[in-house]
Image (cartoon, helix red, strand yellow):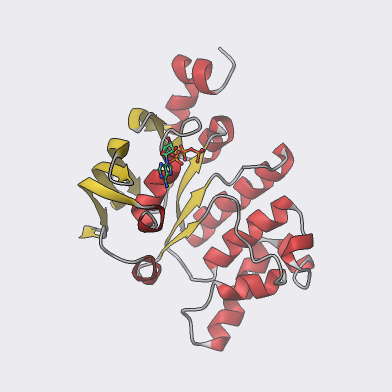
């Protein structure tokens, strides 16, 4: 395949609190411009993998104790989340994390904190609104009074305000009605195709993730147990039986 990897995770081991071994040698590759899904059940290690990439482990008393993580060939294990934003990598955390007391628009603007140029910020805001028309309608609403779907969109929109090249998306479907999940994934795909944003997402909802992603990695107990093209995984009998609930 001609596409180069934007991200390479090579055999990482992650330990929490110095003793709890959670990732036991996870490797994955994210081609530039792709959507890659990390799949698996509760506690499999999906969030931990994303946190390792975005260097958010420290706050959780976790650390990468083996392996390496490379962004376009550069080792990034020791970069701060802010350094990563500067290199175009932004994480959208699980549970949305909008500021409840701020309006949707104020929330979006907090994502542009590293940017100085007001014109650019305004243009970026407009762009976010073209992808998320719902957010435009709700721009003056306090986030606390918007729906779960709107808050998820707001969290993604806020990440986009930093003009990322890669977005790490943790469990975007969580707590949302199926129709809204579909709407969120459609926008993700749209951003991927039109803006060439690369997405690495963690999902328990294997069915939808495999329909929108190009590649998938299935984690079980801190190890990759299966990987491949999303279409192949979706057609795999074991995947159907254990993850799609329709053998
Ligand atoms: P979920 O969908 O529940 O987020 P996940 O696949 O993302 O699942 P992780 O959140 O990465 O899984 O958790 C993997 C394992 O690490 C779990 O056993 C969890 O209990 C443990 N773990 C996560 N965070 C910590 C922490 N801060 N300290 C200790 N153990 C942790």
Q: Position of residue 186 (x, y in %)?
A: 62, 47
- Which residue is pictured at 25% across the width and 55% down the height? 70
Is residue 236 visible in the rendered image? The answer is: no
Residue 174 occupies which quadrant of the picture? top right
Quadrant where ligand 1 appears = top left
- Which residue is pictured at 37% across the width and 72% down the height? 86
**Residue nearest the viewer, comparing 6 with 109:** 109
**Residue nearest the viewer, comparing 133 with 17:** 17
- Which residue is pictured at 47% across the width and 29% down the height? 231
Q: From the viewer's perspective, is residue 157 above or below residue 212?
A: below
Is residue 152 visible in the rendered image? The answer is: yes
**Residue nearest the viewer, comparing 86 with 183:** 86
Quarter holding the N terminus is top left
Q: Is residue 106 left or right of residue 77?
A: right
Residue 134 occupies which quadrant of the picture? bottom right
Q: Position of residue 96 (x, y in %)?
A: 60, 55
Q: Position of residue 226 (x, y in %)?
A: 36, 26
- Which residue is pictured at 46% across the width and 31% down the height? 40
Q: From the viewer's perspective, is residue 214 above or below residue 242?
A: below
Q: Position of residue 65 (x, y in %)?
A: 22, 47
Quarter holding the C terminus is top right
Q: Is residue 73 left or right of residue 192?
A: left
């Amino acid at each position: 395949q001609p596409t180069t990897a934007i991200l390479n995770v090579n055999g990482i081991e992650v330990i929490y609190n110095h003793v709890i071994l959670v990732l036991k040698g996870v490797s994955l590759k994210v081609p530039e411009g792709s959507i890659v899904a990390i799949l698996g059940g509760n506690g499999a290690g999906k969030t931990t993998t994303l946190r390792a990439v975005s260097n958010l482990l420290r706050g959780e008393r976790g650390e990468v104790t083996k392996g390496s993580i490379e962004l376009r060939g550069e080792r990034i294990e020791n970069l701060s989340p802010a350094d990563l934003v500067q290199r175009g990598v932004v994480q959208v955390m699980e549970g949305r994390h909008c500021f409840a007391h701020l309006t949707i628009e104020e929330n979006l603007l907090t994502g542009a904190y590293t940017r100085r140029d007001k014109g650019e910020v305004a243009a970026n805001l407009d762009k976010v609104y073209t992808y998320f028309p719902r957010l435009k309608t709700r721009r003056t609403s306090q986030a606390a009074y918007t729906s779960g779907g709107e808050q998820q969109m707001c969290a993604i929109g806020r990440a986009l305000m930093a003009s990322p090249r890669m977005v790490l998306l943790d469990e975007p479907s969580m707590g949302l009605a199926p129709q809204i999940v579909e709407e969120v994934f459609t926008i993700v795909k749209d951003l991927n195709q039109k803006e060439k944003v690369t997405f690495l997402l963690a999902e328990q909802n294997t069915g939808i993730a495999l329909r929108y992603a190009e590649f998938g990695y299935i984690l079980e107990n801190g190890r990759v147990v299966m990987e491949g093209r999303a279409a192949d995984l979706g057609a795999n009998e074991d995947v159907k039986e254990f993850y799609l609930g329709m053998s």
